[in-house]
Image: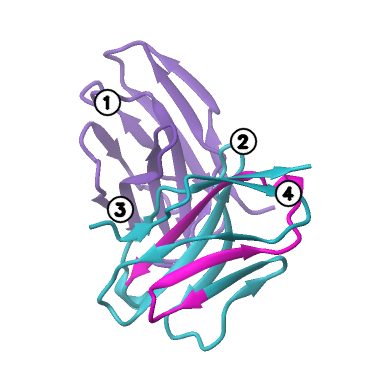
Chain colours: A purple, B cyan
Amino acid sequence: DGGITQSPKYLFRKEGQNVTLSCEQNLNHDAMYWYRQDPGQGLRLIYYSQIVNDFQKGDIAEGYSVSREKKESFPLTVTSAQKNPTAFYLCASSIKEGYEQYFGPGTRLTVT
Amino acid sequence: AQKITQTQPGMFVQEKEAVTLDCTYDTSDPSYGLFWYKQPSSGEMIFLIYQGSYDQQNATEGRYSLNFQKARKSANLVISASQLGDSAMYFCAMREGPLNRDDKIIFGKGTRLHILP
């Protein structure tokens, strides 16, 4: 049963703490993405990766970091430098960049 | 300028009626791709349909069809015989460039669709 998993679904953290969001896919896709969605808004691209050990900044990369050590995994770290980290985070993958993307269920992060 | 414009923030439609969700796009690239996604209240984005700029026919997938009017730069989603489960947020998106150029996909701000029983 192929798909994308994100964990946890809800995450609560105190201000000043780094937090890592998990994203795993078993679709054998080369490309993976992280998006941020704020209430009533569209998706904004944080980081993307076209291939293992390579990733690029998206439109709102400041305060975030990623790694792509395995094809299946693309974790996102929200650092204390991110000014407004509370948001809904979506991970996606596609066969290659530019093809239709398939999304995970998302992680709702609340920082207080 | 916005690359993807969805002018309807919200729509209310009676169950079983057809629905048209508007999307206009802006690109000077002759090769591009257009996508529609559905986001139910659970939050997960679901891919619905794809239209390539050189595709001769409008894309269809079950009850979904894409009304592609290239000259108008319009890619409206049509849902036939709407169902209560169609209530969701719908996003139009575009890849600006051919597939092998690795261009990112840009999303519109979305339209919230409410299906009324």
Q: Quick check: marks 2 and 4 in contact, CB under 8 Å? A: no
Label 1 and label 4 in one chain: no
Please state which of the two labelled residues, at mark 2 or mark 4, is closer to the viewer.
Answer: 4
Q: Which residue is mark 4?
A: B14
User: Which chain is indicated by disc 1?
Assistant: A
User: Which chain is indicated by disc 2?
Assistant: B
Mark 2–mark 4 Cα distance, whole angstroms, equals 22 Å
Please state which of the two labelled residues, at mark 3 or mark 2, is closer to the viewer.
Answer: 2
Looking at the rendered structure, the kind of residue marked 1 is: Thr
Q: Position of residue B24 (x, y in %)?
A: 40, 65
Mark 3–mark 4 Cα distance, whole angstroms, equals 49 Å
User: Which chain is indicated by disc 3?
Assistant: A
Disc with the residue nearer the chain's start (1 vs 3):
3
Res A53 label: 3
Please state which of the two labelled residues, at mark 2 or mark 1, is closer to the viewer.
Answer: 2
Mark 1–mark 4 Cα distance, whole angstroms, equals 45 Å
Q: Which residue is mark 1?
A: A79
User: Which chain is indicated by disc 4?
Assistant: B
Element under disc 2: loop
Mark 2–mark 1 Cα distance, whole angstroms, equals 26 Å
Q: Position of residue B47 (x, y in %)?
A: 57, 58
Element under disc 4: strand
| Residue displayed at 34% across by 80% down | B31
Mark 3–mark 2 Cα distance, whole angstroms, equals 32 Å
Is B48 magenta? The answer is: no
Q: Quadrant of residue B112?
A: top right
